[in-house]
C-alpha cells in the first residue's frame, strides 16, 4: 500500500497530499538540482500544497513519518 498519495499529478495550482495514516510527518519538495523549495510539517492525513509559483517541471516529494521515508515524483505544468 502507498504510504501517501499525490494528486492531481500533473498539477498546476494545488496538490493534495494524502497520508495512509493520520500522523505527524515532514514533507519536503526538491527540484531536480536537489534544491529544497518547501519544507512543511504536516499533521493530518490530507494536506494541500500550493505549487502555482513553481516553474513548470519535475519535482521530488519526500515524506518522512513514523512509517519511514517515502518519495514521489510531481510534475508541474
Image: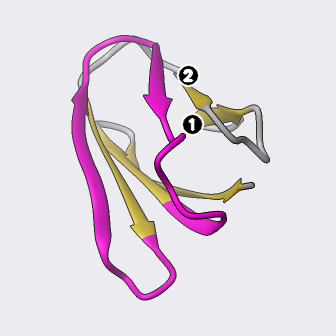
Rendered view: 43 above or below 49:
above
CA gap, disc 2 and disc 1: 5 Å
The answer to whether residue 9 is magenta is no
Residue 69 seen anywhere in this rendered image of the structure: no
Instruction: Name the disc covering residue 3, or none.
Output: 1
Horizontally, residue 51 falls left or right of residue 28, namely: right
**SS of the residue at dot 1?**
loop
Choose between 40 and 62: the one closer to the eye. 40
* Residues tagged 2 and 1 counted as in contact (Cβ below 8 A): yes
Horizontally, residue 1 falls left or right of residue 32, namely: right
Residue 61 seen anywhere in this rendered image of the structure: yes
- Image coordinates of residue 27 in percent, x first then y, are 33, 43
Q: Quadrant of residue 8?
A: top right
**Residue closest to the far bottom:** 33
**SS of the residue at dot 2?**
loop
Instruction: For label 2, count other residues whose C-alpha is less than 10 Å away and answer few (under 14), some (14-19) or many (20+).
Output: some
Residue at image position (37%, 82%) is 34
Residue at image position (62%, 33%) is 13
Instruction: For label 1, count other residues whose C-alpha is less than 10 Å away and answer few (under 14), some (14-19) or many (20+).
Output: some
Q: Which residues are magenta?
A: 31-60
- Image coordinates of residue 30 in percent, x first then y, are 40, 67
Rendered view: 73 above or below 42:
below
Tally of marks = 2
Q: Earlier in the sequence, mark 2 or mark 1?
A: 1
Q: Which residue is mark 2?
A: 20
Residue at image position (46%, 73%) is 31
Amino acid at each position: 500500500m502507498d504510504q501517501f498519495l499525490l494528486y492531481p499529478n500533473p498539477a498546476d495550482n494545488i496538490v493534495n497530499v494524502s497520508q495512509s495514516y493520520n500522523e505527524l510527518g515532514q514533507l519536503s519538495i526538491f527540484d531536480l538540482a536537489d534544491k529544497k523549495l518547501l519544507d512543511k510539517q504536516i499533521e493530518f492525513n490530507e494536506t494541500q500544497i500550493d505549487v502555482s509559483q513553481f516553474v513548470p517541471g519535475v519535482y521530488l516529494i519526500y515524506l518522512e513519518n513514523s512509517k519511514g521515508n517515502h518519495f514521489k515524483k510531481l510534475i508541474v505544468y
